Amino acid sequence: MYEHTSAPMIRQRGSLLLVVDDDHAGMDLPDLPSDPQVTTVVVATAEPPQTLVLRALLNAALAPRCAAVRLVLAGAGAADPDGWCPARQLADSLGLPVIAPDGPVIALPGMLFVVGGDWWTFRPGAGPLAEGPRQPAPAWQRAVTRPVPAGARLVATPIPAGVWLHAGEEPIDADDPVLAVPSDPARVTLVIGRPGSTDPDPRALSEYVRALAPAAGEELVLVPYGPGGRFVDDLAARLPGDAVAAVRVDAGLVAVEPDGATVRIVVDDAGRPAWRPPAQRLRYHGGAAPRLLEWRAPLPQLPALDVGTQPLGEGWLVEVVRCGLWVRPEHADDDTVRRMPAHPDRLLLLVGTPSAPPAATAWPAVRWLLDALPDNELRHLQPVLPAGTAQPDGFPDAWSLTPDAEVMPVPPGGPAGDPSPEWSDDPGCREGRDGDPARQPALP
């Protein structure tokens, strides 16, 4: 018996035209781009229709004011050796420009993106014109199509939000969460690092970002992805006032919690979600400590005294900072702590100030805070105490904080170079990627 196949038909959905085999195809699409001059045609049939069939369907369905067709059909813009492809044939037969992809397309709210390829415009009787991987093209699309330095250990992969900077030549998977990083039509986003890969070349990374930043607008967005993302903080501190007015740092990739809340999470070297940093988003301006834009309260049941700050009692506060949580006296104010970079594998818990050991009244407050933190944050939490502080009983082994706010993976009261038992028992942390992983690498 022959299997019955329905003839393709046109269904209108808002400003879109769907080419389908049945009425249920294409129903799970997000809100796609809408343009009164450009009609987006999504082909959602089991088999691609022939060009003559597609032309007949569109001749009857296109509005008279339509000036161009955006054809969402994987590979419709990929030319054969003679330079012909379905999109070019359709443009000639319709007498209209046709914008089509040369590879697979993913549909995101307000954007259509070609994975590993580009959109092309085919005009009747003319050669094709490359448009870039995003449709509609954001204002910054042309600005981010620059090559990386020759011979450098750096790959610049286009993603919907901007550019993914990493090492390694492995092709991007269509389900990689980096493709879901939210896109902002007014800002370029740079995702830095790749789980399971070596670190990008720091010098090439710095040169690439500095060259791109002036064309990216008033603000650049940086997002760490895996351990290689630790370069983000140094870039964010150096760029404002030089190559760009401001830099926003997002704590990690986007995830959705069980309650439906959207959060940003740290991704580990195996590509697994690790924990949710309390400091979710920060903005860096030239010469100033980063300003907290979005945060998750470590003690949700308590009110905030100020942005990122909650009371702990006995004259102590907990403040959300880039590197984690800072338990400090209520009258202490030290921007050196607020400037401290995030650690790629640890959520740092700083107690006291860099210049002096904390008073004994801090420990009940710290215990209360530890009891309130969720398990996934506790598993990655690393206490850090000012140099000279005795290790408190009943608390995890601490690292040392020098007077100039540098974190050392040694007990706060021990000699430099003697690693704590927790540090030395973790071979991944002991060896690290660039020497001592407790110290953040400085870009050239």
Image (cartoon, helix red, strand yellow):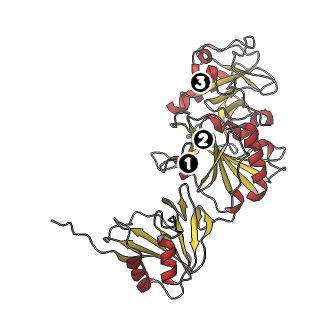
Say left or right for 53 vs 418. Answer: left
Most foreground residue, 412 or 18: 18
Could you tell me which secondary element the residue under label 3 belongs to? helix
Q: Quadrant of the N terminus?
A: bottom left
Disc ID at residue 367: 3
Q: Which residue is mark 1?
A: 178
User: Label 2: how many residues lie within 10 Å, few (<14), some (14-19) or many (20+)?
Assistant: many
Question: What residue is at 59 percent from the left and 24 percent from the top?
Answer: 367
Q: Nearer the viewer, mark 2 or mark 3?
A: 2
Question: What residue is at 61 percent from the left and 15 percent from the top?
Answer: 424
Could you tell me which secondary element the residue under label 1 belongs to? helix
C-alpha span from label 2 to label 1: 8 Å
What's the amino acid at mark 1? Val
Residue 169 makes an appearance in the image = yes
Q: Which numbered disc, 3 or 1, marks the residue that appears first in the sequence?
A: 1
Most foreground residue, 338 or 345: 345
Q: Which residue is mark 2?
A: 225
Could you tell me which secondary element the residue under label 2 belongs to? loop
